[in-house]
Amino acid sequence: MIVYPAIDLRDGACVRLMHGRFDQVTRYDDDPAARLEGFVDAGAEWVHVVDLDGAEAGRAVQHDLIGRLARAANVNIQSGGGVRARDDVAALLDAGVARVVVGSQAVAAPETVRDWLGAFGPDRIALALDVNVRDGVPVPALKGWTEAARIDLWEALARFPEGAASHLLVTDVGRDGALTGPNLDLLAEIVRRRPDLQVQASGGVAVAADLTAARDVGCAGAIVGRAIYEGRFTVEQALEAVR
């Protein structure tokens, strides 16, 4: 399993949201480059970087900063937020990002995103489906988690048949930043239905055992944010747990 320490950028600072709400922001530090270097020094091979301003605005906002981070550190960066056009994907890849995360467009414009996957390759793009679970049904959230899709997660995934995509990042919005543990039932169901996808768990990781639990249900990766920022465990301990 790959552990992805997270850097969520808002106004150039490292922050975390609670339940994806932009009015519930915790600011952790003002030097994302130092934070990134710390993750690299701890042994991280991948880091997950999100342009929260871009996600909220629906357009690229901090891609220049993300590019500087990608060029400055010897690490693979997976990044998204505000990716709405092919040029956004190309700009991030050209800046040195290893994999671009595409969220709302994967639900709103699947044909377009399939074209991007064909053009850039399925290993350079991760589909990111953020969901709210309603009466047991996972429903994708769009536009910085401010709107609900009219289809469920399974229909959204069906628009990317086997072979179209390789990476899927799934965030349970209700658990994001809440330190309540990942939604293992949902993750296991996704892995069961779509064994062709490398699933990344996001939302709720509180202790290192949550990472091994996600691995044990078949996840190929896990995003870790608040638990590391608040000292519940270190990047070193996370990496050791999943070895």
Image (cartoon, rainbow, N blue to C red):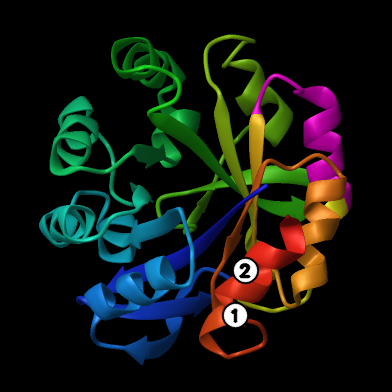
Tell me which corner region of the image, top left, top right, bottom left or bottom right, holds residue 140: top right
Nearest the viewer among 205 and 136 is: 205
Q: Which residues are magenta?
A: 185-197
Task: Examine the image and state in which quarter residue 22 appears.
Answer: bottom left
Quadrant in which the C terminus is drawn: bottom right
Structural crowding at the residue carrying mark 2, measured as other residues with C-alpha within 10 Å and reported as few (<14), some (14–19) or many (≥20): many
Q: Which residue is mark 2?
A: 176
Q: Secondary structure at mark 2?
A: loop
Question: CB of mark 1 within 8 Å of CB of mark 2?
Answer: no
Residue 34: x, y in percent?
27, 79
Mark 1 and mark 2 lie on one chain; the one further toward the N terminus is 2
Which residue is label 1 attached to? 234
Q: Is residue 193 in the magenta section?
A: yes
222 w.r.t. 12: above or below? above
Q: Would residue 61 be visible to someone looking at this image? A: no
* In the image: residue 36, left or right of residue 17: left
Q: Give the residue type that dot 2 points to.
A: Asp
77 w.r.t. 239: above or below? above
Q: Position of residue 4 (x, y in %)?
A: 52, 57
Residue 124 badge: none
Q: Give how far across and how far down residue 42 sits, in percent.
A: 48, 72
Q: Residue at x 64, y 10 (%)?
A: 162
What secondary structure is the stretch in magenta mostly built from?
helix
Using the image, determine if residue 17 lies above or below residue 27. above
Which amino acid is tagged 1? Thr
